[in-house]
Image (cartoon, rainbow, N blue to C red):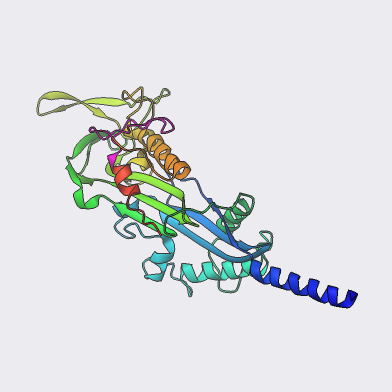
Amino acid sequence: MKKGFFVILLLIMAVALTACGPSESKFYFASQTPTDNSSWVYWVVIEKKGDKVVGAEWNAFNIEGDANNTYKGMDKVAASKAGIYNMNSDLWWHEQAELVIDKFIESNGDVNDRIPAPAGVSITTGDFYTLAELALASDPVEKGNYKDGYHFFSTKASATDRAAVNFWDPVAEEIITAPVFKYYTFGSFVVVNGRIVLAYYDSAFGQYRLDLDSENKVKTHVVEIEGKETTLKVIAPYTSDAPTLYKTKNQLGLSYAMKRPNGPGAFEYFEAAKSAGDFLIENQKLPETDGDGNFKEVDGVTGVTITASDFVTLSKLIPTK
């Protein structure tokens, strides 16, 4: 009788375990924080089933978006697979990244098991392991309704022309001109487990960084142009052969000169763009805009007094499942 009871009990347990099925995947995410001097901004996604690491992703986006005529908004893996990101090595970047990921999975996510690097890997792996450690220490990503992956969108098709602008070059001691350019907004987004976990907004804007005083006021210089005194903004000193003409507003940082003491705003463009991105990550959608292109609901979107309609337009392009 007891033997029969235990047989039945084992059968019940087996059925219960079968019904439960394999462990559900959980996803963990971490990314770098872009700055005005960033180039590629890396992120890592880790997939776990129970206590076992079963998958990982290592990728990056370029902060210049499609203002960069080489990558045109592509992520690093895609650019490498397309033969555009060329390191002149035996293995492409994405192939080396896959080797690093394979070792990481085999070690079951041991972030200290990084030396030696797998044969053929010449890229720096510190970014991957730093982000992997941050991802594993975070909470799993909640489920959402968006399509997983990297998404890039741009309003370049409706770009507007911006005129050339004169500045004063303190190194060459002459007028320097930022040429005409196309102005538009773009966004880079990462979706994990259906949820937006990275949102980066920027706008194409060709200009030089400016020289600021101790109070971040833009320095000016008076020159005579065609017999008339004209006040020009002074570009920042440089040590290279020529100053860098930056491609986006975020790259200009405080040099965009939107906030006080240079303009009426309390926040600079890069701060407002980050606030909009952070709001999108937190709420999974942006507030609608009014007739002037400003957010109708500004609570939680600190400093976004800039025209925000493009931000909303781009966020609505992120595909759902």
Q: Is residue 158 left or right of residue 58?
A: left
Q: Residue at x 21, y 46 (%)?
A: 181
The location of residue 133, given as percent across then percent down, is 63, 54
Which quadrant of the figure has residue 102? bottom right
Q: Is residue 293 magenta?
A: yes
Q: Is the residue 320 above or below the residue 230 in the image? A: below
Residue 307: in magenta span: yes
Residue 304 quadrant = top left
Q: Is residue 285 left or right of residue 310?
A: right
Q: How many marks?
A: 0
**Start-end of magenta stretch:** 290-309
* Rendering quarter of residue 99: bottom right
Residue 51's spot in the image, x, y percent?
A: 69, 62
**Pick the front one: 95 or 318:** 318
- Is residue 245 visible in the rendered image? The answer is no
186 up-or-down from 166: above or below: below
Task: Using the image as rendered, state which of residue 307 and residue 317 is in the foreground.
Answer: 317
Residue at 50 percent across and 55 percent down: it is: 43
Horizontal side, residue 98 vs residue 149: left or right:
right
**Is the N terminus in the top left, top right, bottom left or bottom right quadrant?**
bottom right
**Looking at the picture, how far across and down is residue 168, in whole percent?**
26, 33
Which residue is rendered at x = 32% and y = 38% of the image?
A: 288
Residue at 48% across, 60% down: 59
Q: Residue furthest front?
A: 1
Magenta highlight: main SS = loop
Q: Quadrant of the C terminus?
A: bottom left
Image: 67 above or below 7: above
Tell me residue 295's x, y (percent).
32, 33
Single out the residue that lies furthest toward the right: 2
